[in-house]
Amino acid sequence: MSQYQPDPKNSQVSREVTSSLFINQTPPVGSSLDGVTDLICFSHLRWNFVYQRPQHLLSRASKQWRVWFIEEPIYGDNQRVEVRTISENMTVVVPHLRHGTNPDEALRQQREVVDQLLAQQNIQDFIAWYYTPMALSFSNHLKPRMTIYDCMDELSAFLGAPASLLDKEKALLTQADLVFTGGLSLFEAKQARHPNVFAFPSSIDYRHFEPARHALPEPADLQNIPGPRIGFCGVIDERMDLTLLRNLANSRPDWQFVLLGPVVKINHATLPQGPNIHYLGMKSYKELPAYFSHWDVAIMPFAINEATRYISPTKTPEYLAAGLPVVSTPIQDVARTYGGWAPVAIADSPQSFEQAIEKMLTQSDDWTAVDEYLLANSWDTTWEEMSRLMQAQRALVFE
């Protein structure tokens, strides 16, 4: 689950721009795609934000290449570049620009950061990996060995999306060698616009969430919240049906609604409030199984609007891997991928949503088919298939 403009706050230690900004790193030995040593990713999401598709995929990519994750600028009092090492071959790069920097100068400075990275790290054979088409504005001069557009959301439909985003996406689709989509609906929307579009819906790190089925230690901020607990985890933004949540909480004061995640782009004053609604804030990916372990039902109360038309929520398989039954509004990719299983209910009204939760609180389902599906759709499998497609595309280029 993603959003276009995340909260830019970041407390990590930074390095000022100097001639030795980027510490030299040695590429991994035995990388796939002969000659490629690096992957440069341009992202609208911050690495320290919600742990989702980019983190899953690029962490795996870093076992093959050096990965440089370039975020959008943060505006403040000083011009500098933040360089943060995540792991041996994973580095996050964040340009910090001064307040008031005009758009053309901002693009020039971002281009300079990229050029400096390539020069100092002697990056010549690399893959350009885009999550945001807007990054073409300062990276269209690059000469990557391959360009990948991993289209995880229809960003143009999100609140605050730049007016030029569709034009930039058109240009990126012209340049990209491969296009991956974050769901089947997005695949259907993009497949006629590029000859090599492949659907890769949300996958799952099953082993990370399965321990939630075995009574993990209860987080401190859950301990004073009675049950039954109805949980949501993710970004709380314009895609959330706040009216639905408010109606559910008012209708069932005996249920406790627990929400994990940051509130983004919407006024906090508009959030439903009540003694049985609990906003516990953002939790790390590592913490999530402990929370899921002490919920009774997971919900996805998404609004049905342009911003949710193409989403394929990462949380669906995560909830299921944790052993949580799921109730969702009729998000297309959720309904057709998971809707046929007993632990998943699709509800299109406040009344049916409430009834579905009540049913999930009491019924016991057979999870065999669900678990077989989840185990077959791991992030490892997804990355392996993406790598295979990249290798095949590389071979075509050099035939």
Image (spheres, rainbow, N blue to C red):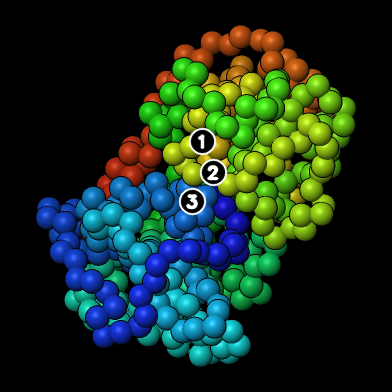
Instruction: Name the mark on residue 283.
Output: 2
Instruction: Name the mark on residue 288.
Output: 1
**Cβ–Cβ below 8 Å for labels 1 and 3?**
no
Direction from residue 172 to residue 332 in the image, left or right = right
Residue 381, visible in the rendered structure: yes
Label 3: few (<14), some (14–19) or many (≥20) C-alpha neighbours in 10 Å: many
State the image quarter where residue 123 is shown: bottom left
Q: Is residue 94 above or below residue 148?
A: below
Q: Is residue 156 above or below residue 226?
A: below
Q: Of helix, strand and loop, which one carries label 1?
A: helix
Q: Of helix, strand and loop, which one carries label 2?
A: loop
Q: Residue 154 at what x, y percent from top left?
A: 60, 57
Q: Which residue is mark 3?
A: 181
User: Going from the N terminus, do you reach mark 1 or mark 3 first?
Assistant: 3
Direction from residue 23 to residue 155 in the image, left or right = right
Q: Residue 159 at what x, y percent from top left?
A: 70, 62
Quadrant (top left, top right, bottom left, bottom right) of the C terminus: bottom left
Q: CA distance from mark 1 to mark 3?
A: 25 Å
Amino acid bearing label 3: Thr
User: Going from the N terminus, do you reach mark 3 or mark 2 first?
Assistant: 3
**Cβ–Cβ below 8 Å for labels 3 and 2?**
no
